[in-house]
Image (cartoon, rainbow, N blue to C red):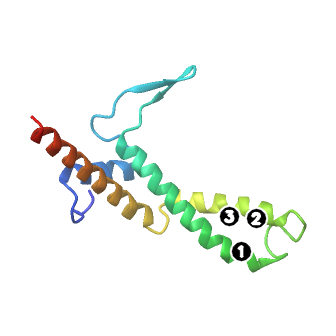
Amino acid sequence: MTAALPGLSPAATVALDAGRRGAPAAGTAGAVAIGSRAMPAKSAAETARAQAQDFEAMFLNTMMQSMFTETGGDGPLGNSPGTGVWRSFLVDEYAKSFAKAGGVGLADQVYATLLGQQEARSATATRNLVSTR
């Protein structure tokens, strides 16, 4: 279980733990039909986890691109006219792989922030709904 993060409710902490394990959060059962296939419905927590991981992959990609710009002909791709394009593909896959394996911890922080913002929006909407009655 995750240590309580400042500003997150116990429910958000449970969702954060579920996202880290890759397990669906409570109340996310169901499927959505897309085309001819049925795909499991993604909860807000699962979507937030995926977005946080994508953000970390983008960040890592940017850092690694600058790291690999000076390698020239060294490395697995040699030195040919298409090296820059293929190197960018390779670095993109490296970044995605690193982020999926846990990365540098940026995704966890972004995920916690996204959950906190969703909770704040939900609380505001609930207060507005109650006050209009």
User: What is the CA distance from the residue labelled 3 to the residue labelled 2?
Assistant: 6 Å
Residue that mark 1 sits on:
68
**Rendering quarter of residue 76:** bottom right
Task: Using the rendered image of the protein, determine whether residue 11 is visible from the camera's viewpoint.
Answer: yes
Percent x, y of residue 109: 37, 64
3 or 1: tag closer to the N-terminus: 1
Task: Using the rendered image of the protein, determine whether residue 22 is visible from the camera's viewpoint.
Answer: no
**Rendering quarter of residue 63:** bottom right
Does the CB distance between marks 3 and 2 fall below 8 Å? yes
Q: Which residue is drawn at 60% across and 62% down?
A: 95
Which label is found at residue 87? 2
Reply above or below: 50 against 74: above
Q: Which residue is drawn at 80% across and 66% down?
A: 84
Q: What element carries label 2?
A: helix
Tell me the quarter of the image containing the N terminus. Answer: bottom left
- Amino acid type at mark 1: Phe
